Image (cartoon, helix red, strand yellow):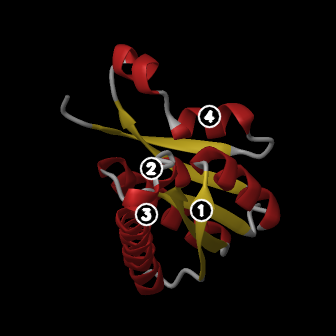
Amino acid sequence: MYDSILLPTDDSAGMGRAVEHALDAASRYDATLHVLYVVDTDTYGTYSGDEYVHELEGLESALEQAGEEAVEAIVETAEAAGVETETAIRHGVPHEEILAYAEEADAGLTVIGSKNRSGEYRRLLGSVAERVTRMAERPVTVVKTPVDE
């Protein structure tokens, strides 16, 4: 049914169950698991002043390193389960990059983790998972993980 499954990660508390779900699906369908981390350019790109350029470059590098570590941890787990993987680190707006990558990789399914938070919290901050689900033209499974507020 699926030849390719996309698992975007942000290395948050909401990812554990999503990783398990994606690995199970990839194993069942003998699919390649694409593991994607998006470095959110809004995190380091909103300040326009020159006096902090070096600090911002350090932040960008730290975010990239965190992404590489998150992706590598999932790849190690996938390899142990006998699941083939492909990886990518992208820079941009997370939901936009996830949707673009899903198209490029011809992902039959995107499995995305989400922290199960209250409605008021979600209204204030929004959700990458919510945007991906709403805007995707391909199937998306949201795997929720409860978190303490």
Please tell me in which quadrant of the rendered image residue 114 appears. Answer: top left
Please state the horizontal and vertical placement of residue 83, each as a whole percent of the image: 55, 80
| Residue occupying the point 73% across, 35% down | 135
Please state the horizontal and vertical placement of residue 141, each as a whole percent of the image: 59, 44
| Mark 3 neighbour class, 10 Å CA radius: few under 14, some 14 to 19, many 20 or more | some
Instruction: Say whether disc 2 or disc 3 marks the residue closer to the N-terminus.
Output: 2
Give the vertical position of 56 relative to 76 (above or below).
Answer: above
User: What kind of element bears circle 1?
Assistant: strand
Work out which residue is located at the far left of the displayed protein and give it.
148
Q: CA distance from mark 2 to mark 3?
A: 13 Å
Residue located beneath label 4 in the image? 131
Tell me which amino acid carries mark 1. Answer: His
Q: Which of pointers 2 and 4 indicates the residue nearer the eye?
A: 2
Instruction: Say whether disc 3 or disc 4 marks the residue closer to the N-terminus.
Output: 3
Q: Which disc is residue 53 wearing?
A: 3
Residue located beneath label 2 in the image? 43
Left or right, 137 with reference to 43: right
Please tell me in which quadrant of the rendered image residue 115 appears. Answer: top left
Tell me which amino acid carries mark 4. Answer: Arg
Residue located beneath label 1 in the image? 91
Tag 3 near tag 1, CB within 8 Å? no
Please state the horizontal and vertical placement of residue 100, each as a whole percent of the image: 75, 55
User: What kind of element bears circle 4?
Assistant: helix
In front of the other: 124 or 28:
124
Q: Quadrant of the C terminus?
A: top left
| Residue occupying the point 62% across, 70% down | 34
Left or right, 83 with reference to 31: left
Instruction: Say whether disc 3 or disc 1 marks the residue closer to the N-terminus.
Output: 3
